[in-house]
Amino acid sequence: MTTPHAQQVSDTLPHEPEKATLEGRNKVLGFWLFLGGEAVLFGTLFATFLTLRDQVADGPSAAELFSLPITAAATFILLVSSLTSVFAIQAMHRGNRKSLATWLGVTVVLGLAFLLLEIYEFYEYIVHDDYGMTTSAFSSAFYTLVGFHGAHVLFGILWISILIGQLMRKGLTVVTAPKIYVSAMYWHFIDVVWVFIFTVVYLLGKVV
Amino acid sequence: MSTHDLNEDGAVKHRHRQEGPQKHVIAFIFSIILTLIAFAAVAAGGVNTAFTVILLLVMAILQVLVQLGYWMHMKDKGHMIPILFMAGGFFVAGLAIIAALYWMWW
Amino acid sequence: MAHAHSVKRYKGLMDWITTVDHKKIAVLYLLAGGFFFGIGGIEALLIRVQLAKPMNDFVTAQQFNELITMHGTTMIFLGVMPVIFALMNAVIPLQIGARDVAFPFLNSLGFWTFLFGGLLLNLSWVMGGAPDAGWTSYTPLSSSQFSATHGVDFYTIGLQIAGLGTLIGGINFLATIITMRAPGMSFMRMPMFTWTTFVTSAMILFAFPAITVGLVLLTFDRILGANFFNVELGGNPVLWQHIFWIFGHPEVYILILPAFGVISEVVSTFSRKRLFGYSSMVFATILIAFLGFMVWAHHMFTTGMGPIANALFSIATMLIAVPTGIKIFNWLFTMWGGQITFTTANLFASGFIPTFVMGGVTGVMLASAPADYQYHDTYFVVAHFHYVIVGGLVLGLFAGLHYWWPKMFGRVLSERLGKWEFWTFIIGFHMTFFVQHFLGLIGMQRRVFTYLPNQGFDLMNLISTIGAFLMGVGTLIFLANIILSFREKKGVAGDVWEDGRTLEWAIPSPPPEYNFKQIPLVRGIDAFWKEKMAGHQEMTPAEPVGPIHMPSPTILPFLMSVGLFIAGLGFMFTNDDFGNSLLNFMFNKYIVVAIGLGMTFLCMLLRSLYDDHGWHIEEEELKDGGVQA
């Protein structure tokens, strides 16, 4: 065996602990593959949305419905959270567990803020405007696309929170490092999807 | 277990030194500017619609490239397989979107 | 670092439920695939009995719709896919000289989600009616307005869960082939079956998320009252067709590519020749996969996309004939001048080549959009896709099973019975489907539950039915062959065909738990053959003998899949009134869904919290295995 096994916890952690073991490298690679599949998943959801974006039936159109300030705030929050997760990974590469945990914590809080904003937005539409999944083909497509993204954010929040707990209990090892690295990749991917959502759904909804 | 690995990097020898946060802060500011341009173009309104659409899409793609390239390290060495498979995913996603734009209604 | 961890070793049923050994998972896939293949086969026979004579009333029109829907769905998603995965699991790690797959836990999870998805789908037979909107489940026929029973819900949710398993399996094989190859095995030294598995897995990765979305949309339409396909509120039924075929067309290449790989291995071994045009084979495989994503709309020529789209997709479709033709010629040139032995495996492989060519030719005919307006939804189409799927894939699977059976189970299947199998099956196959070309051309539509006499349909339908039963006989002989083989003593030579070319033949049959005692060093294409030709009896090891690390068995994948099964069942009956306040509460308030999903996520949490340290097989425990022949 040329590479150490996952259970080996060394005092001198390698520079990129996420790639120190075969298990770790496999995990990172496997997650890239998964993200390739996720790209198709969201691509198909976007295709659905683009097909049905003008099919508002009796309901309001995108331009009437959306409010740009909320979207701008959500975008800013998610963008900052992407930066904080980059800082987290840099802290991990320095071997600084405390800083890593802090940055992960900030990322989770920002994710939570994003999610609350989205829940507020949906709540406004559903309760105030009486605008639900069943209103029109456009509303179905909107809630499904944005809801899928929101569900991803929720999963990410839970996942990273659990990883922070593991980091505190088990420390930064060649076992925990790949998990954290992969969760950061996931978080960036969520942001990538959001960039397309705020552009295609919200901004283009206001323009055409 | 020994492996023959296409994206073998960093595991044995560390080629690049730790990058400082400056580069990522610059990438972040760049992203913010791109976002601001996009939102401003829509908020301002009145501009040529086709131009705005193209501008928005270009801003989005640039920002995604920052995310993928800098923050997900795809520009670094040893990412041939991730690039290949992410490109594949985006390609098939693109097919679905082309179908949506051109062949769904007539 | 070689300190041994204590590990629970289970026995009997518990061993099978908790196993993460790819060789055992292969057996599980084979059992499950065989089971569903049997169900799909019985459904096929019932269909043929109904169509044996005009104006037959053996089954009702509704039952017939359920039968054809379930026959197609079962055969494609639950019958042949798992048998393909069985071969991949049994062979790929051995062919690349690895001790295991990249993700043993995910491998097991993939199997169990597939199985529970399949069981959920088939539960529909006893829970208020099977899906009845065809395997393609076109909207609006599959909407709750026109399919009022829960049948289509079983289809959407069952396939969703089974599809998840397939996706997981695909990712696992991609990572395995990328990172776990033995030293010296570059991409261009990989055996052809490994190559086709690699490309197939990539196609799974990119195609299955599309159907995931399609099924979600249909589920939301039916259960949450969404309007994706509801024209009244702006929905678009053509959207389903596009999404389904963006997945569906790659899916048929996902099915056939592994068969191409099997044929390449079998033909080359039993011709005692290296595969002709190896690099062109690799190139053709990748090209087929690429083009496979670009042709989905040829299923939709009559939808009315307009002449430009139709012309584009016509041309793209016809292009696929080029790489496929390259493959056909390469197999023929491999056989040409070889010392051919017609074992059963090679008989099936040789039968595959002309049969598949016939299916390919009708494929090019169908690719011509104007002509397709005539063929569309007739038995010509039915004949075409059965020629490529049964005459292509199923013959390939038979070849592969006969070829690798000794490696998987340490027992050889009877060649005598094998020949009976082959001839009954292939004669039955051509009887069943050859006449269907002409039935289609003279106007018999597919999916009709009966037909009027004296239209020229009667005799050909009868021939077709007789052929179907002959195929059934062939399958039964295969089953008997399997049962008889298990009465023989286990343990055949490692290189049982004596002409084995690839690494799996360099280790004992069946292989030890750790596959290779020492990871072999690969010096070229057909690594084992190369060593044999150099006068060596065994592979050169790439590492000294040492303790071997193994992953621990775990029941979590099984429980996660049970959780998904419960959640799926719960979601389906959300809007039902059970006439019982407790049941209404449990289902209508999503309590059952929450319990099921909670179970799945709890298992994920446990998996994350408790690290699997695995265990070691110490040097003393290693039997005489490894790379020794």
Image (cartoon, rainbow, N blue to C red):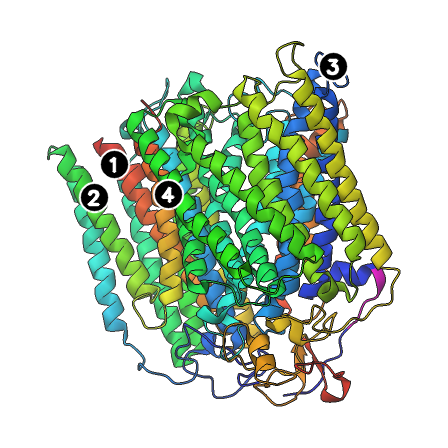
Is label 1 in a helix, a strand or a loop?
helix
Q: Nearer the viewer, residue A32 or B38?
A: A32
Is label 3 in a helix, a strand or a loop?
loop
What chain is tagged by disc 3?
A: C
Instruction: Tell me the CA gap for discs 3 and 1.
Output: 57 Å
Q: Nearer the viewer, residue B75 or C417?
A: C417
Percent position (x, y) of residue C234? Answer: 39, 21
Magenta stretch in the rendered image: C8-12
Under mark 3, the amino acid is Asn
Select label 3 or label 4 by which is in front. Answer: 4
Neighbor class of circle 2 (other Cα within 10 Å; few <14, some 14-19, many 20+) is: many
What chain is tagged by disc 4?
A: C
Under mark 1, the amino acid is Leu
Instruction: Tell me the CA gap for discs 1 and 2.
Output: 8 Å
The residue sitting at 55% across, 22% down in the picture is C440
Neighbor class of circle 3 (other Cα within 10 Å; few <14, some 14-19, many 20+) is: some
Identify the disc placed on residue C56: 3
The residue sitting at 50% across, 72% down in the picture is C525
Residue C10 on the magenta span? yes
Q: Residues at badges 1 and 2 in contact (C-beta under 8 Å)?
A: yes
Identify the disc placed on residue C247: none
> Which residue is most to the right?
C487
Under mark 4, the amino acid is Leu
Q: Are marks 1 and 4 on the same chain?
A: no
